[in-house]
Image: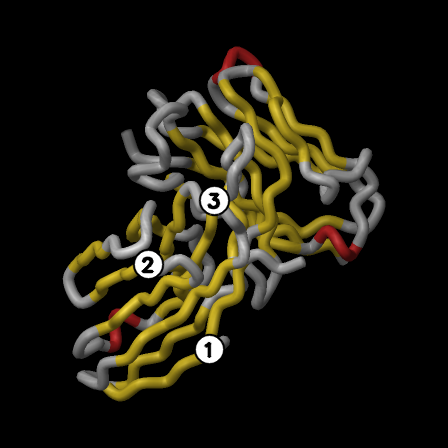
Amino acid sequence: EDQVTQSPEALRLQEGESSSLNCSYTVSGLRGLFWYRQDPGKGPEFLFTLYSAGEEKEKERLKATLTKKESFLHITAPKPEDSATYLCAVQAPGGSYIPTFGRGTSLIVHP
Amino acid sequence: DTGVSQDPRHKITKRGQNVTFRCDPISEHNRLYWYRQTLGQGPEFLTYFQNEAQLEKSRLLSDRFSAERPKGSFSTLEIQRTEQGDSAMYLCASSLAGSKGNYGYTFGSGTRLTVV
């Protein structure tokens, strides 16, 4: 049973064309939701942690939001250097709080 | 501190051989995690340590896999009798227990294993 589903799998944007990535989750009692960026051949790089519905976090052109069922990563006026795979992970209730990752959204921003 | 270091970056091995990977976490982090990632998939949890104690292992971690973290510092992941299905990126991450994930996990750049 998938706990985390990310959509779309791939997204191509023109530079400056804003869009949103989706992460839907099925765990109840969410402990935390993480967003990571991963460049080819590298490990994931931490972006944000969200804990409760209504929470928002921003960093440069990225803004993450959280509801009770999903999270969005909004990308405003993207640049080619924003091209990467964006991963979402959720922390379910339990002793170890090990996060479960989604498959990611591969974003390509064309100049 | 330069972050989480993994060695080697790439490893090509013949099927049936044993391989060992090393991870050096951020020095003040007491938790260390191993993940495996295949193309087009997100990282899959394998195991984690708090200090030197291995506290959890995934069902993905077959008997051919073993991990250690002597003295609660660096960690090694060994795969015995490698199979082609073991080909993947092996990622190590570290964190500070009790931080509630406020700063997420810090990942290394991974070891890319290819079994031929």
Please name the residue shown 67% across and 32% down the image.
B57
Residue A16, compared with residue B13, is above or below; it is: below
* Marked residue nearer the N-terminal end (1 or 2): 1
At mark 3, the secondary structure is loop
Using the numbered discs, state the Cα–Cα distance from disc 2 to disc 3 in whole angstroms.
14 Å
Mark closest to the chain's N terminus, 1 or 3: 1
Using the image as rendered, state which of residue A18 and residue B7 is in the foreground.
A18
Residue labelled with disc 2: A66
Q: Amino acid at mark 3?
A: Gly
Same chain for the residues at labels 1 and 3, yes or no? yes
Q: Nearer the viewer, residue B43 or B17?
A: B43
Q: Quadrant of residue A88?
A: bottom left
Q: Please, what is the three-letter code of the amino acid marked with disc 2?
A: Leu
Q: Is residue B59 above or below residue B72?
A: below
Mark 2 and mark 3 lie on one chain; the one further toward the N terminus is: 3
The residue nearer to you, when weighing B106 against A68, is A68
Mark drawn on residue A29: 3
Among the 4 quarters of the image, the one containing residue A111? bottom left
Label 1 sits on residue: A8
Tell me the element at label 2: strand
Q: Amino acid at mark 1?
A: Pro
